[in-house]
Amino acid sequence: MTETPKLSVDIWSDVMCPWCAIGYTQFAKALDELDGEIEVETRWMPFELAPDMPQEGKSQAQHLADVYGRSSDEVAAMRAQIELAGERAGFPMVFEGPEGEPGMTWNTFEAHKLLRWALADQGPEAQTRLKLALLRAHFQQRRPVGQRETLLDIAGEQGFDRAKAAEALDDDALAMAVRLEEKRGIEAGINSVPSFVINGRYLVQGAREPEDYAGMLRKAAVLAAGGEVRNA
């Protein structure tokens, strides 16, 4: 009986990144397609799109205008494009509240600390569960994921011990570990997200179609087994 190939995938991502949510939604479809064919273990790695963002956050529209030098109309067009891509992928997004409340951008360092702790505490599947909950909280529920109490609430909702999660957020060693991981990613050439690193060797960047991810994972599995990938 042939053993199922096993791959590890490190996903460098930020909770504030809409393309990360869209990309993983597509990637998850690829994993469903490969179920029983390839076993994939996923881990989430820290990348901050706005490391200097204040704890109180900032209007997303203003942040996009400042970062990209766009007008309000251009920002609206950017958001419309993202919303359409999210709908097509199956991850709808809500940037503004029902009364026109502005969407926000938050500092995500504490969220990255929580995700690293989740991996150590309960493993990759639980970490993914928490990551997806954070993405839904930000892009679909408009919850302030830059605030400590919100992070602890979400951790508790996902089956983590709230008191232990609070201890993790207060852990200076954990903060240092996240900073070191961020530095490692930058040194490895991770300069945009989402970035998928397969078996620590093969880099796939950006939100892609499910069949693209599936094809790359199949190629990586062949190479990991010592085979050769031949073009059709």
Image (cartoon, grey):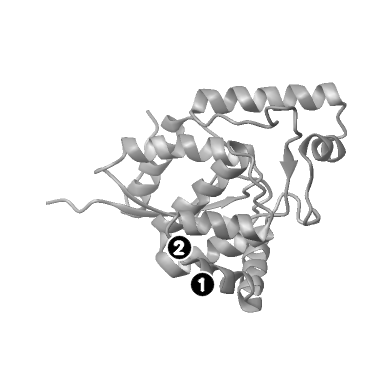
Closer-to-camera residue (107/202): 107
Q: Which mark is residue 160?
A: 2
- The location of residue 219, given as percent across then percent down, is 38, 42
- The location of residue 73, given as percent across then percent down, is 83, 21
Q: Could you tell me which residue is drawn at 63 percent across and 37 percent down?
A: 18
Q: Which residue position holds label 1?
A: 164
- The location of residue 216, given as percent across then percent down, is 43, 40
Q: Could you tell me which residue is drawn at 68 percent across and 27 percent down?
A: 98
Q: Could you tell me which residue is drawn at 76 percent across and 34 percent down?
A: 102
Q: Secondary structure at mark 2?
A: loop
Please state, as top left, top right, bottom left or bottom right, where the C terminus lies in the image. top left
Q: Is residue 156 left or right of residue 191?
A: left
Callout 1 crowding tier (Cα within 10 Å): few <14, some 14–19, many ≥20: some
Q: Quadrant of residue 32?
A: top left
Q: Amino acid at mark 1?
A: Lys
- The answer to whether any part of residue 214 appears in the image is no
Dots 2 and 1: beta carbons under 8 Å?
yes
Q: Is residue 156 left or right of residue 189?
A: left
Closer-to-camera residue (205/140): 140
